[in-house]
C-alpha cells in the first residue's frame, strides 16, 4: 500500500493536482487485473482499453459524450479511423462476451460448427430456459423437460464443451437473470441471442439482443457491425414510492414512444431520480425497453449497482468500477437526440394492453376502460416472475401483499403463478419464507425458466377461442403469445399490481383506493407493498447447475442424428446469381402488426428450433392475409387453390418460383429469433418489402442473404395486389444509399414501377452476393 501511495504522489506531482483521479487509478488497476466473472479467471475486465478509446473519440468529436456513447465507442475496433455519425454510419465493434438461450443457441451453434473454427474467441455461455413448459409445478415440469428435450440438451452441452462455451443446465434460471447475477457489470458490452438481453443495462452494461449469426461473428473474433445508435435521454426526477414501481417507468415510456419509437436508438436514463431505483428495478426498465424497439437501454453506475455487485460476490468489480466511474456516467453537457422527462413522485401505477405492450393505462382507469371496450373484467390468471420481474425485491413486495391477505384469511380469487428468475432467487425466497407465503395465498411456484412468458404454458382453464383476461408481470402481450389463445386479453404490469388484481379477481380493482372483503365479511385495504432490495443475509446459491468448458476438448464428439426431427446440420444457402430478381410471386401481403411471433411462432414450435426444415412449417402462420383477413390461408397462384403459407412457399420453391413477402409497419418487432429470417430464405424467399422494419429482424434478414427493402413512399404498399408478379431491378449496381426499383406486373397486364430503399452497407452487400454472412465468412477464411 505504501508503494501505491508513493506512486500516486509521484503521478500527481508529474500530472498536476488537476489530473483526473481515474487516470492515476488506471495505473494501479493495470497491476491487479480483475476477472470478468468467477467462471472465467483468465478473462479480465478491459476498463483501460475502453478508457483509451473514449479519450480518442472524445478528442475526435470535440464534445461531451453520453454514457451510451462512452461504452459503445469504447468498444470500437478502430477508434481512430471509425466514421461516427449517430443514426447513419455503421460501427465495427468488439463486444466482450456472448450469451445464448437454448432455443436460439441451437441454430447459433449449428452455424458456428459450420464455420469450421475450433473455439470461441470471446467468453460465451448457453442458458437452458426456453424449453421448459409450465404444467403442474417447478419440480415436475423441470423433470419432464429434461426427458422431452434430452437430445437437444445433450447437443448443447457437448457443443458447449467442444467449443469452449459455458453451459447453464435446465433449472439454472432465465438467461437475463443469470447474466445480471454473474456476467453483467458497468461498462461491459455483451450481445445475446434474445431480444430482452438489454436487461443487463440495469447494471450499467450495454447489452444488445441479436440473431444467432451476429453471435457467430463475435464468437469467431470478427468485428461486429451495429448502426451507430441515436440516444434518447429519459430524465428521471422525484422518488418512487407507494404502489409505484420501476415497472411503471417503462410502462409509461412505452406509452409515450410506442412499439417503434425507440428503433435505432439507445435509451439512456439519467437524472436525480435514478438513485431511488434499485439495481434490479433498473434491469426491469431496461429489459422492457425491447418493447419500444430500442437497441438497448442503460443506467449510469451508482451506489445501487455497487451494492448489488457486492451482494452477488463481485466486490472486486465494484472497486475497479469506482476507479473508472467517470467512464461509466454521462459527461456533463452531453446532448441527446430526444429527451423525455418523468417525475417519479407523480408517476402512477400503470397497466398496458391488451395485445400490445404500448397501450398504456393508469391502473385507476383500467376498469372503466375495459368495460367501455368490451374487455373481460374478470381476471382468470395472475402471473408474476419472468426475466422482467423476478428479483428478490419483486418477490418480496408481492409477498408483502399476499401476507396482508393471508392475515385476513383471504386467498387469490384468480389462479396465481410464480416464476423465480434463477435458482439463486428460488433458493433464497424459499429460505426467507417468501415462497411459502406466495404458495399459501394460492400461488403455484413454477420452474426457474421462461414458461408462460414465451408461450410455454399448458393452460387448461379456458378453451381456445374463449374470451378471457390474464394479468402478468411479463414484457410482451402479443395476440396468443402466452397461451396460444387469440382471444386471451393479456395485460402487463408490475408484480405488485398483478398480485393485487389476482386477490381481487377483477380489472376494476384499484388497490390505492378500493377495499377487499375478507371471508369474515371485514372490509380492508391493502397497504402499499414493501420488500427488501436485497436479502439481509447472502444469497443462497441453491444447486450448482453450471458446466465449465474443459481445458482439453479435442476428444469430445458433437453428434447430430441424420434422422432427428429436433436437430439438423445446416446446408449453405445458394449464392446470388448476378441477375435481377424477376417475376417473383407475392407469397402473402400481410395486414397490420406482424411480429416475429407471427412470422415464426414459439410455444409448441420451440422444440424444432434446431431443425430448420421442420421449424419452417410455422412460417407466417400467424400473419393476417390482407386478401381475406385470414391467418395461414393464402392463394397458390400456380394452382389457384388456397393453402397454408408454408405449404404454398414449399410448392413455389419446388417449382423454381421465387417469392416475396409484403408487409406493413415495424415488421419483425419482438423477439430476436433469427428463424424468422432463416425460414423464408430456406423456403425460397428472396425479398421482404415493407413500410419499415424492426432493427434486429432487418439485420437477421441481411445475414441470411435476403433483401429487406422498404417503400420509398409508404403508400406504395397499397399498389401491390396478392396476385401480382414483382421484379427487383438494379441489383448489379447495388450500393449503399442507392434505391432499387420494383416493377409490379398486375394480372390485367398493366405495370407500374416504385422505388425501394435499403440500408445495406458495403460489407452487407457482400453477404447478399455470397448468399449469407456465414457463406461470406467462409470465403474469407
Image (tube, rainbow, N blue to C red):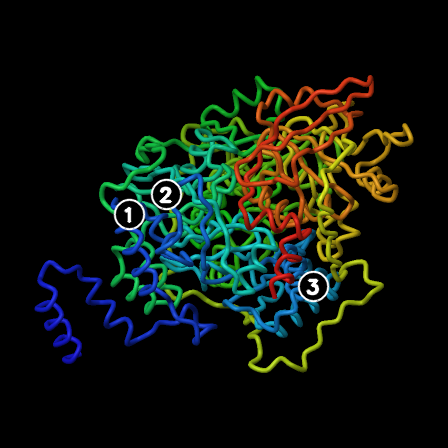
Instruction: Name the residue beneath numbered marker 3.
Output: 143
Q: Where is residue 739 in the image (x, y as percent from the top left)?
A: 58, 32
Q: Where is residue 298 in the image (x, y as percent from the top left)?
A: 39, 47
Closest to the observer, 190 or 173: 190
**Residue 420 in view in this figure:** yes
Please report whichever mark, 2 or 1, sits nearer to the chain's N-terminal start: 2
Furthest-front residue in this view: 733
Cα distance in 3D space between marks 1 and 3 = 47 Å
Identify the mark at residue 429; answer none if there is no mark: none
Q: Is residue 396 above or below residue 127?
A: above
- Secondary element at image label 2: strand
In which quarter of the view is residue 658 placed? top right
- Secondary element at image label 1: loop
Disc 3 crowd rating (10 Å Cα; few below 14, some 14-19, many 20+) is some
Instruction: Name the residue beneath numbered marker 2.
Output: 268
Closest to the observer, 324 or 757: 757
**Residue 435 in view in this figure:** no
Instruction: Name the residue beneath numbered marker 1.
Output: 330
Disc 1 crowd rating (10 Å Cα; few below 14, some 14-19, many 20+) is many
For the residues labelled 2 and 1, say whether their Cβ atoms are less than 8 Å apart.
Answer: yes
Disc 2 crowd rating (10 Å Cα; few below 14, some 14-19, many 20+) is many
Q: Where is residue 102 in the image (x, y as percent from the top left)?
A: 63, 59
Q: Give the position of the C terminus as an image quadrant.
A: bottom right
Is 544 on the left-hand or right-hand side of 5? right
Please report whichever mark, 1 or 3, sits nearer to the chain's N-terminal start: 3
Q: In this view, does 275 lie above or below 308?
A: above
Q: Where is residue 169 in the image (x, y as percent from the top left)?
A: 61, 66
In front: label 3 or label 2: 2
For the residues labelled 3 and 2, say whether their Cβ atoms are less than 8 Å apart.
Answer: no
Amino acid at each position: 500500500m505504501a508503494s501505491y501511495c508513493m506512486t500516486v504522489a509521484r503521478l500527481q506531482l508529474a500530472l498536476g493536482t488537476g489530473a483526473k483521479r481515474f487516470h492515476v487509478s488506471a495505473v494501479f488497476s493495470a497491476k491487479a487485473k480483475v476477472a470478468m466473472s468467477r467462471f472465467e479467471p483468465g478473462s479480465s475486465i478491459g476498463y483501460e482499453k475502453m478508457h483509451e478509446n473514449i479519450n480518442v473519440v472524445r478528442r475526435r468529436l470535440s464534445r461531451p459524450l453520453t454514457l451510451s456513447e462512452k461504452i459503445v465507442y469504447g468498444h470500437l475496433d478502430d477508434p481512430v479511423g471509425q466514421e461516427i455519425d449517430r443514426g447513419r454510419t455503421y460501427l465495427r465493434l468488439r463486444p466482450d462476451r456472448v450469451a445464448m438461450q437454448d432455443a436460439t443457441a441451437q441454430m447459433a451453434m449449428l452455424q458456428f460448427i459450420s464455420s469450421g473454427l475450433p473455439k470461441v474467441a470471446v467468453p460465451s455461455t448457453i442458458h437452458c430456459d426456453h424449453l421448459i413448459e409450465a404444467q403442474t409445478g417447478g419440480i415436475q415440469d423441470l423433470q419432464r423437460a429434461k426427458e422431452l428435450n434430452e437430445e437437444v440438451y445433450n447437443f448443447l452441452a457437448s457443443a458447449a464443451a467442444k467449443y469452449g462455451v459455458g453451459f447453464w443446465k435446465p433449472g439454472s434460471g432465465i438467461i437475463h437473470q443469470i447474466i445480471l447475477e454473474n456476467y453483467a457489470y458497468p461498462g461491459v458490452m455483451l450481445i445475446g441471442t434474445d431480444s430482452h438481453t438489454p436487461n443487463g443495462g440495469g447494471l450499467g452494461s450495454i447489452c444488445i439482443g441479436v440473431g444467432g449469426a451476429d453471435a457467430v461473428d463475435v464468437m469467431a473474433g470478427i468485428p461486429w457491425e451495429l448502426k451507430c445508435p441515436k440516444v434518447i435521454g429519459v430524465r428521471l426526477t422525484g422518488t418512487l414510492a407507494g404502489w409505484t414501481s420501476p415497472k411503471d417507468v417503462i410502462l409509461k415510456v412505452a406509452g409515450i414512444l410506442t412499439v417503434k419509437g425507440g428503433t435505432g436508438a439507445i435509451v439512456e436514463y439519467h437524472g436525480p431520480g435514478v438513485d431511488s431505483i434499485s439495481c434490479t428495478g433498473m434491469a426491469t426498465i431496461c429489459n422492457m425497453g425491447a418493447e419500444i424497439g430500442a437497441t438497448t437501454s442503460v443506467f449510469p453506475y451508482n451506489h445501487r449497482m455497487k451494492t448489488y455487485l457486492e451482494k452477488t460476490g463481485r466486490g472486486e468489480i465494484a472497486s475497479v468500477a469506482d476507479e473508472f466511474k467517470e467512464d461509466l456516467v454521462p459527461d456533463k453537457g452531453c446532448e441527446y437526440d430526444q429527451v423525455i422527462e418523468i417525475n417519479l413522485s407523480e408517476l402512477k401505477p400503470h397497466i398496458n394492453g391488451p395485445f400490445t405492450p404500448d397501450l398504456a393505462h393508469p391502473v385507476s382507469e383500467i376498469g372503466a376502460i375495459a368495460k367501455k371496450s368490451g374487455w373481460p373484467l374478470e381476471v382468470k390468471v395472475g402471473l408474476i416472475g419472468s426475466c422482467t420481474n423476478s428479483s428478490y425485491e419483486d418477490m418480496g413486495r408481492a409477498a408483502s401483499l399476499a401476507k396482508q391477505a393471508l392475515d385476513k384469511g383471504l386467498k387469490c380469487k384468480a389462479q396465481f403463478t410464480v416464476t423465480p428468475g434463477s435458482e439463486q432467487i428460488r433458493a433464497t425466497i424459499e429460505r426467507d419464507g417468501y415462497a411459502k407465503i406466495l404458495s399459501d395465498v394460492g400461488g403455484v411456484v413454477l420452474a426457474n425458466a421462461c414458461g408462460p412468458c414465451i408461450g410455454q404454458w399448458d393452460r387448461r382453464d379456458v378453451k381456445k377461442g374463449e374470451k378471457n383476461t390474464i394479468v402478468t408481470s411479463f414484457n410482451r402481450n402479443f395476440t396468443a403469445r402466452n397461451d396460444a389463445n387469440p382471444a386471451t386479453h393479456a395485460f402487463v404490469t408490475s408484480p405488485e399490481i398483478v398480485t393485487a388484481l389476482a386477490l381481487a379477481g377483477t380489472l376494476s380493482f384499484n388497490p390505492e383506493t378500493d377495499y377487499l372483503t375478507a371471508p369474515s365479511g371485514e372490509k380492508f385495504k391493502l397497504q402499499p407493498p414493501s420488500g427488501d432490495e436485497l436479502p439481509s443475509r447472502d444469497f443462497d446459491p441453491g444447486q450448482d447447475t453450471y458446466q465449465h468448458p474443459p481445458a482439453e476438448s479435442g476428444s469430445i464428439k458433437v453428434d447430430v442424428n441424420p434422422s432427428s426431427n429436433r436437430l439438423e446440420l445446416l446446408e449453405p444457402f445458394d449464392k446470388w446469381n448476378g441477375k435481377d430478381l424477376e417475376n417473383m410471386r407475392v407469397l402473402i401481403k400481410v395486414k397490420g402488426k406482424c411480429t416475429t411471433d407471427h412470422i415464426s411462432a414459439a410455444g409448441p414450435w420451440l422444440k424444432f428450433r434446431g431443425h430448420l426444415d421442420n421449424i419452417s412449417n410455422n412460417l407466417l402462420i400467424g400473419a393476417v392475409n390482407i386478401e381475406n383477413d385470414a391467418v395461414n390461408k393464402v392463394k397458390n397462384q400456380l394452382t389457384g387453390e388456397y393453402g397454408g403459407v408454408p405449404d404454398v412457399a414449399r410448392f413455389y420453391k419446388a417449382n423454381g418460383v421465387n417469392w416475396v413477402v409484403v408487409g406493413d409497419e415495424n415488421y419483425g418487432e419482438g423477439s430476436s429469433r433469427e428463424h424468422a429470417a432463416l425460414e423464408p430464405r430456406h423456403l425460397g424467399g428472396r425479398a421482404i418489402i415493407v413500410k419499415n422494419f424492426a432493427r434486429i429482424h432487418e439485420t437477421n434478414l441481411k445475414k441470411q442473404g435476403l433483401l429487406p427493402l422498404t417503400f420509398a413512399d409508404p403508400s406504395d404498399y397499397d399498389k401491390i395486389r396478392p396476385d401480382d408478379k414483382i421484379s427487383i431491378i438494379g441489383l448489379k449496381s447495388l450500393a449503399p444509399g442507392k434505391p432499387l426499383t420494383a416493377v409490379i406486373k398486375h394480372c390485367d397486364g398493366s405495370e407500374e414501377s416504385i422505388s425501394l430503399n435499403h440500408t445495406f452497407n458495403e460489407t452487407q452487400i457482400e453477404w447478399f452476393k455470397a448468399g449469407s454472412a456465414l457463406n461470406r465468412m467462409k470465403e474469407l477464411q
